C-alpha cells in the first residue's frame, strides 16, 4: 500500500521571497552607497548618520509604495481577465470547453481523453480550470499587494540598518572601508540565504549581488569625492 505524503514545493515561496530579497538588497546597496557618497565628500560622522537614517526611512516608504502599486496593477489585470473569462463561460460554455480541451491536446494528451478531462474539470470548477490552465493564474502565483508591500518595507529597513550599524561602530577615519567591506559581506550573505531559501545554487546569486553592490558603491563614492573636492 502506497503511503500518502505531503509535498512542499519551493515555488510557493516565490511571492514573498522575491519581495524580501529585493527589499533587503536595495536597503543594503542604496544606504551603503548613500553613506559612502557622503563620507567620500569628507562630511562629519553626524551628517553621514543623518543621511543614512533619512535614506532608510525614505527608501522603506518608497519600496512599500512601489511594490503595492506594481503588484496591485498585476492583481487588477488578473481580476479583469477572470471577469472576462467568467463572462465567456456563461455566454458560450461549449466553446470554452473545447478551448480547454485544445490546451490539453497541445500538451500531449490524446484528444478524446483531453475533452473528457475538460468536461470533468469544468463540471467541478470551470472558472478555476480556465484560470489555471488558460490564464496561468493559481493560488501560488496570484498577486498579493499588501504582502509584497509590507515584506519589501520590512526587509529594506533591515538591510539598510546594516550599513548604518557599521557607521556607528567604526572609527571616523575607518568609515569608508568598514561600510564597503561590511556591506559587501552582507550582500554575499543575502545572496546565499536567498538562493538556499529558493532551493537554487548559491554561487551565481552571491557573485551577482556582490558585483552590482560593489559597482553601485564605487560609483557613488567616486561622485561624492568629486563633489566634495569641488564644493
Image (spheres, rainbow, N blue to C red):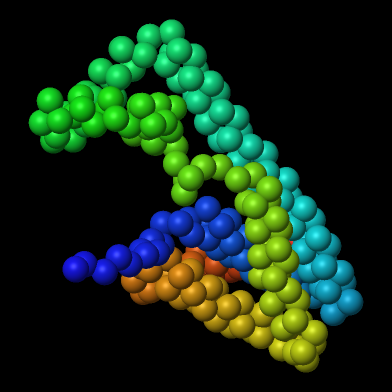
Task: Reply above or below: 188 against 219.
Answer: below
Task: Reply above or below: 115 against 152.
Answer: above
Viewport quadrant of the N terminus: bottom left
Task: Reply above or below: 138 against 83.
Answer: below
How far across and down, in percent of the image, does residue 18 sit?
52, 56
| Rendered image quadrant of residue 96 | top left
Q: Residue furthest top?
A: 91
Q: Residue at x 36, y 14 (%)?
A: 93
Which of the pair 199/122 is nearer the observer?
122
Q: Residue at x 55, y 67 (%)?
A: 213
Q: Residue at x 28, y 25 (%)?
A: 119
Q: How many marks?
A: 0
> Does residue 207 appear in this view?
no
Q: Is residue 100 left or right of residue 35?
A: left
| Rendered image quadrant of residue 66 | top right
| Rendered image quadrant of residue 127 | top left
Q: Residue at x 59, y 61 (%)?
A: 20
How far across and down, in percent of the image, does residue 144 sit?
60, 45
How far across and down, in percent of the image, does residue 51 sit?
82, 66
Which of the pair 130/66 is nearer the observer?
130
How far across and down, in percent of the image, does residue 95 sit?
31, 12
Q: Is residue 134 left or right of residue 49?
A: left
Viewport quadrant of the C terminus: bottom right
> Does residue 194 appear in this view?
yes
Which of the pair 66/34 is nearer the observer?
66
Amino acid at each position: 500500500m502506497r503511503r500518502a505524503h505531503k509535498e512542499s514545493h519551493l515555488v510557493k515561496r516565490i511571492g514573498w521571497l522575491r519581495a524580501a530579497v529585493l527589499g533587503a538588497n536595495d536597503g543594503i546597496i542604496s544606504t551603503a552607497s548613500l553613506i559612502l557618497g557622503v563620507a567620500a565628500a569628507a562630511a562629519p560622522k553626524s551628517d553621514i548618520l543623518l543621511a543614512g537614517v533619512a535614506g532608510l526611512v525614505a527608501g522603506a516608504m518608497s519600496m512599500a509604495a512601489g511594490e503595492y502599486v506594481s503588484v496591485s496593477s498585476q492583481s487588477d489585470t488578473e481580476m479583469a481577465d477572470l471577469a472576462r473569462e467568467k463572462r465567456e463561460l456563461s455566454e458560450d460554455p461549449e466553446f470554452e470547453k473545447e478551448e480547454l480541451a485544445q490546451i490539453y491536446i497541445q500538451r500531449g494528451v490524446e484528444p478524446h481523453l483531453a475533452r473528457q478531462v475538460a468536461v470533468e474539470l469544468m463540471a467541478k470548477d470551470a472558472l478555476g480550470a480556465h484560470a489555471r490552465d488558460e490564464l496561468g493564474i493559481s493560488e501560488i502565483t496570484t498577486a498579493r499587494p499588501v504582502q509584497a508591500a509590507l515584506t519589501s518595507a520590512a526587509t529594506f529597513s533591515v538591510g539598510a540598518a546594516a550599513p548604518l550599524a557599521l557607521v556607528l561602530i567604526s572609527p571616523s577615519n575607518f568609515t569608508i572601508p568598514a561600510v564597503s567591506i561590511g556591506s559587501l559581506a552582507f550582500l554575499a550573505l543575502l545572496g546565499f540565504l536567498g538562493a538556499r531559501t529558493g532551493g537554487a545554487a548559491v554561487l551565481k546569486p552571491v557573485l551577482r549581488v556582490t558585483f552590482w553592490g560593489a559597482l553601485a558603491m564605487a560609483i557613488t563614492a567616486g561622485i561624492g569625492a568629486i563633489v566634495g573636492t569641488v564644493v
